[in-house]
Image: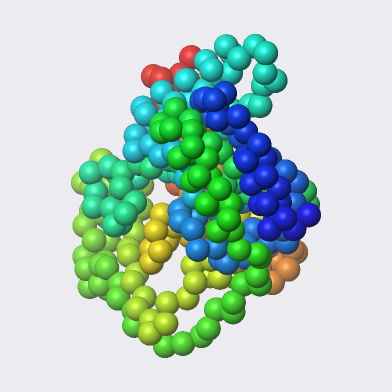
């Protein structure tokens, strides 16, 4: 069924709930049909809106609409996850529905000035979650009955479902003029490079990665979801993500590597050095990749990263 019909089906299930028996966190799901998660998100008016598509083609992609519960620290998130696990263990008479999915992130540097509205840490339990994996889609709604009266929580969930709009094609990203401002400027950048390449600095820090911020100002700001859709089409073998806590500000990105993945006590990282431009076809891609692997400078940088990871993580590992 189309997503609008799926939302109506969920709304009907909500109306049939026994409010006197509602407690804890509950999730209801129905199958649906959606062609493009990003196009669906772009058509919605509810915030927050989040998107996550892993690099692997067989992995599940997610589109998030609204929030049932929010957390501003990892400690608060972990407390809630533990409470959910305990509640499921105690509900012997009910079939286990699995742990709910939370979405969000933390700042790289909690002390640095962040973007307005993002903060140091924010995770949410989605109000509505659209999941797509290998062509199959599921629309889910989450309810948290421990935070407020069941009737209010039910009304909030119904309102979010009623606000869902049908999927529409992404608008084209218009080409127009813009102003560009780089921080640092070119002279400042040259000064930084001169500083970090001094022999005494290199003895302390054998590998330094400099970065800059580029601000583009345009007359017409494009839709962040349309821009993400454009990037995604041109960089398929990447992790694609988008976060829009409120209208007017969004974070979107496409990363070719996974910083880290933690499952229980196991940590896997792809923090590698070196980049290369993409080729025109697969053969040229393979040739460029081979040249990058054979590059001595890149090999040295990778060794620096590898050694730093061991130095930082070995004291914490078993």
Q: Position of residue 186 (x, y in %)?
A: 27, 73
Colour scheme shown: rainbow
In the depicted structure, whether residue 152 falls above or below residue 94: below
User: Taking the image as drawn, is residue 102 in sight?
Assistant: no
- Image-quadrant location for residue 288: bottom right
Q: How many marks?
A: 0
Choose between 208 and 63: the one closer to the eye: 63
Instruction: Assign the N terminus to one quadrant of the image.
Output: bottom right
Q: Position of residue 233 (x, y in %)?
A: 65, 67
Choose between 251 and 211: the one closer to the eye: 251
Point 48% across, 46% down: residue: 156
Choose between 154 and 88: the one closer to the eye: 154
Q: Residue furthest bottom?
A: 177
Q: Position of residue 20 (x, y in %)?
A: 54, 25
Point 42% across, 77% down: residue: 221
In the depicted structure, whether residue 316 falls above or below residue 310: above
In the depicted structure, whether residue 278 falls above or below residue 124: below
Q: Position of residue 70 (x, y in %)?
A: 40, 39
Point 66% across, 72% down: residue: 169
User: Taking the image as drawn, is residue 315 in sight?
Assistant: yes
Point 46% across, 87% down: residue: 176
- Image-quadrant location for residue 35: bottom right
In the displayed structure, does residue 34 sit left or right of residue 215?
A: right
């Amino acid at each position: 069924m189309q997503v609008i019909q799926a939302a109506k089906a969920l709304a009907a299930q909500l109306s049939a709930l026994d409010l006197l028996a509602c407690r804890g966190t509950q999730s209801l799901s129905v199958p649906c049909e959606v062609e493009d998660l990003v196009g669906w998100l772009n058509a919605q008016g509810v915030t927050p809106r989040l998107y996550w598509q892993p690099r692997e083609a067989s992995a599940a992609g997610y589109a998030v609409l609204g929030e049932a519960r929010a957390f501003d620290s990892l400690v608060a998130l972990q407390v809630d996850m533990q409470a959910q696990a305990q509640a499921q263990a105690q509900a012997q008479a009910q079939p286990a529905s699995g742990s709910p999915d939370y979405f969000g992130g933390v700042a790289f540097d909690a002390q640095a000035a962040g973007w307005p509205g993002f903060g140091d840490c924010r995770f949410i339990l989605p109000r509505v979650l659209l999941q797509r994996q290998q062509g199959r889609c599921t629309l889910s709604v989450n309810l948290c009955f421990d935070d407020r009266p069941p009737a209010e929580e039910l009304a909030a969930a119904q309102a979010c479902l009623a606000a869902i709009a049908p999927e529409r094609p992404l608008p084209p990203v218009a080409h127009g003029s813009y102003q560009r401002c780089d921080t640092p400027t070119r002279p400042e950048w040259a000064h930084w490079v001169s500083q970090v390449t001094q022999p005494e600095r290199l003895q302390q820090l054998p590998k330094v990665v400099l970065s800059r911020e580029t601000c583009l100002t345009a007359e017409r700001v494009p839709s962040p979801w349309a821009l993400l859709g454009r990037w995604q089409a041109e960089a398929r073998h990447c992790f694609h993500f988008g976060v829009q806590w409120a209208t007017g500000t969004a974070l979107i990105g496409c990363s070719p590597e996974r910083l880290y993945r933690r499952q229980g006590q196991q940590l896997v990282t792809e923090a590698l050095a070196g980049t290369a431009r993409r080729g025109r076809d697969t053969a040229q891609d393979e040739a460029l990749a081979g040249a990058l692997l054979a590059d001595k400078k890149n090999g040295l940088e990778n060794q620096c990263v590898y050694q730093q990871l061991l130095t930082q993580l070995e004291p914490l590992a078993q």
